[in-house]
Amino acid sequence: MAAWIAQRLYQYDRAELFTMWGMTLPQVATTLAAALVGNRAGLISEPVLNSVVVMMLVTAIAGPLIVKRAVRDLPTLDDDLEADLIVPAIFDGRAADFSVLVPISNPQTEQSLLGLAATIAHAQAGCIKPLAIAPAQAKMDSPRMRQVITEREALLQGATDIGEQLNIQVDPLLRIDRHVATGISHTAREHHVNLIVMGLNERHFNLSTRLFGDLIDKVLWASHCPVAIVRMTAAPQSIQSILIPIKDFSASEAHKVELSIAIARANQANITLLHILPVRPSAKRLRWVSDKLARLAGEAPQDVIITPKVINHDHVAKAIMAEARHFDLVVTRTRRRRAHGGRLEIGDIPSLLVQQLKCSLILFGEPQS
């Protein structure tokens, strides 16, 4: 009765009515205490007490079952968000000079990083900006400073040669800075870059604290533009299938799809949008999810095949890993959240994916995400 009155007063729909009813239906703690006190005081007979116990069991079982069924049709925050799907964060048509910043320090990984950056930049007829950071010394004319600059210039020359092989415009940058992370984020801002592509060094990954290394931590937190944290297990040119787990239907998810489309177009790769639900959805909810996935894929070029997929699983990370066995690349999002001590905390799902996925992986972070 109380749930029905609340529905009438506040114009709740049928699913909200049954959710309220199911959550208030169980009669356990207070009912049992009152019944026991009444029985001991001689106000309630044994048969009545037994009936109360039966009622407790029935309501305690029925309540969760009703809620489980009703929540499938509950409106979520995403239902009220139009998701700003037409506002791109990376490929902004108003940007006259599209550029991708690629910090380099390891010749063994720069080939794949620059290859991926070039693939993305090609989509906007832009350029890549390899960046080498030279740690600042007390005296700019010291032998150590000259040696460091020479080493960084050699790295940039190698990156320029790779860019020429990839047929992409290259604008190499050398920066002297006391802090590598600060140098990266400041350079990105000063040169108005649209995206930062960084390599994921798993030696800096610490499961016990669920953190990436300090460098990625600080760049993620400070950068003004999106950051793609990349681990490539094969050449970017060999990617033929891309899996994109879709958590919600926000603008950030659309930007992630947009990034993947740029990669797919270069390789004629297929894209799968994977949405995972913890319970089997109702027909209404399934139609709503399918419509949202179709909107995410709606602006894709005709030469890119995007397949929406909805599955039921109570463990998101395990579901993604099971699906990822059939794909060359997984593109997922990482949220920037400050933990105690001011450090950046990476969610459980990206942490598990980094450790257990065997295919290539891109963790995509955006400002304010």
Image (cartoon, grey):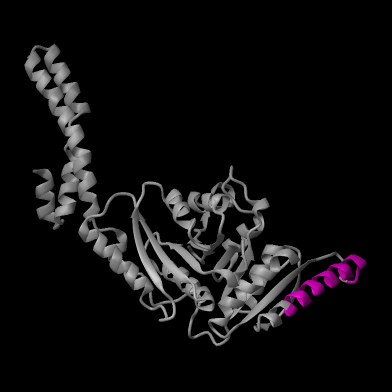
On screen, residue 250 above or below 323 = below
- Asked if residue 194 lies left or right of residue 112, the reply is left
Q: Which residue lies furthest to the right in this view?
A: 143
| Residue 214 position in % (x across, y down) | 65, 55
Q: Nearer the viewer, residue 195 or 287?
A: 287
User: 207 or 274: which is nearer to us?
Assistant: 274
Which residue sits at x=60%, y=80%? 99
Q: Quadrant of residue 164?
A: bottom right
The residue most toward the bottom is: 96
Direction from residue 30 to residue 217 in the image, left or right:
right
> Which residues, given as a range, are shown in magenta?
141-161
Check the image and report above or below for 278 versus 79: above
Tell me if I can see residue 129 in this picture. Answer: yes
Is 248 part of what is drawn in magenta?
no
The dominant secondary structure in magenta is helix
What is the x, y in percent for residue 70?
Answer: 20, 49
Query: Percent position (x, y) of residue 256?
Result: 47, 68
Q: In this view, does 363 lie to the left or right of 56?
A: right
Does 148 sit left or right of 339 as displayed? Answer: right
Question: Which residue does the image show at 17% across and 53% down from the upper left?
Answer: 15
- Residue 300 location, quadrant: bottom left
Residue 330 position (above or below residue 278): below
**Rendered-image quadrant of the N terminus:** top left
x then y, percent, for residue 68: 24, 45
Q: Which residue is drawn at 38% across and 68% down?
A: 307
Residue 153: in magenta span: yes
Q: Residue 44, can we see it?
A: no
